[in-house]
């Protein structure tokens, strides 16, 4: 346990075009779309920090500068809030600008998730790393944050890779990366194989890979030699498969929490409602509004 290298850094890939949310994402990065009034990416960053991550490497593309601006100091805004005695909002803005040590690197071509992770290697160094995808939100209120759950499993397993898993309904497997393997105790699943978006009817299980990874330093040389797969992209799943079969080993863990798919329109709407219902100042009015809308729709 004591010899396991601590996970200090995280990668958040944010170079995608967000085409599923056009036209909203024509000028606004999809990672900045709000869950009520908090950008999706901020929720992911807060999860990483609450999990013990000290530094975040953001992998961006063209038109994503507003993400960096969000975590920077906004002198004009803060001065205006101060002059207007809006001290609660001022403290919130100051908190955001001091929230995280953020490093930004550019993915110049959309060559896949594996490539996006590899682009961040220079900023990470030869260290283990957490990877958090911005489309997946985990509400683990009252429990450990999702990334912390994976880091704890990584430490228990002596530094093996650990990825988040979720069971999907039969017939949905072809939409995701799917794993095969056996239960290994402590809620983990020893992975023996995995495949990215298998053809319908060929998936080895109904357990899919969902948006959170804690990877040992052994992943870096594997990623460097991973060849492009489907659509000419370097798939992280291909590197994870080699890590599981030939490398240090890889386990899965079903996160104890509620996952929201913020990369899907219905999932995004569901996340907005779920997070709004957690806020006492919004819950009564929102419930009344939802009941009214349902009544009007049924009528």
Image (cartoon, rainbow, N blue to C red):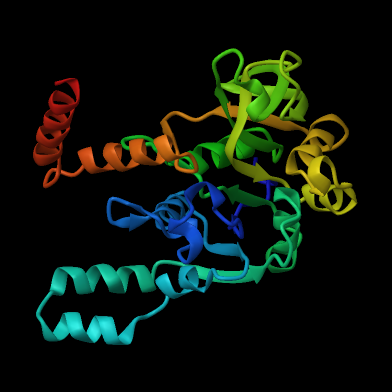
Residue occupying image coordinates x 45% and y 42%: 262
Vertical relation: 223 (above or below) 77: above
Q: Nearer the viewer, residue 271 or 221?
A: 271
Vertical relation: 6 (above or below) 159: below
Q: Could you tell me residue 126's position as x and y percent? A: 76, 60
Q: Quadrant of residue 64?
A: bottom right
Q: Quadrant of residue 271?
A: top left
Q: Nearer the viewer, residue 246 or 179?
A: 179
206 sits to left or right of 143: right
249 sits to left or right of 31: right
Quarter containing the C terminus: top left
Residue occupying image coordinates x 75% and y 24%: 198
Residue occupying image coordinates x 60% and y 20%: 172
244 sits to left or right of 173: right
Residue occupying image coordinates x 19% and y 84%: 80
Is residue 99 among the parts visible in the rendering? yes
């Amino acid at each position: 346990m004591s010899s396991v290298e601590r996970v200090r850094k995280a990668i958040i890939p944010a170079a995608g075009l967000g085409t599923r949310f056009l036209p909203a994402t024509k000028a606004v990065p999809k990672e900045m779309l709000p869950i009520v009034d908090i950008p999706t990416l901020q929720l992911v960053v807060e999860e990483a920090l609450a999990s013990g991550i000290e530094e975040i490497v953001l992998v961006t593309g063209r038109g994503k500068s507003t993400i960096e601006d969000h975590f920077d100091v906004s002198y004009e805004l803060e001065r205006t809030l101060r002059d207007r005695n809006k001290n609660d909002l001022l403290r919130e803005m100051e908190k955001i600008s001091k929230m995280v040590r953020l490093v930004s690197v550019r993915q110049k071509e959309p060559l896949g998730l594996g490539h996006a992770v590899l682009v961040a290697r220079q900023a990470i160094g030869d260290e283990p790393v957490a990877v958090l995808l911005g489309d997946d939100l985990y509400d683990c209120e009252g429990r450990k944050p999702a990334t912390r759950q994976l880091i704890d499993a990584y430490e228990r397993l002596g530094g093996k890779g650990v990825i988040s898993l979720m069971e999907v309904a039969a017939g949905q497997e072809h939409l995701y990366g799917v794993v095969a393997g056996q239960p290994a105790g402590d809620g983990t699943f020893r992975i023996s194989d995995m495949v990215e978006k298998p053809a319908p009817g060929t998936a080895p299980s109904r357990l899919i890979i969902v948006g959170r990874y804690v990877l040992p330093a052994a992943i870096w040389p594997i990623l460097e030699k991973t060849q492009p797969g489907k659509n000419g992209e370097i798939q992280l799943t291909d590197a994870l498969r080699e890590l599981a079969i030939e490398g240090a080993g890889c386990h899965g863990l079903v996160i104890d929490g509620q996952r929201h798919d913020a990369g899907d329109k219905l999932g995004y709407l569901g996340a907005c409602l779920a997070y709004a219902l957690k806020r006492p100042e919004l819950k009564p009015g929102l419930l009344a509004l939802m009941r009214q809308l349902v009544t009007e729709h049924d009528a």
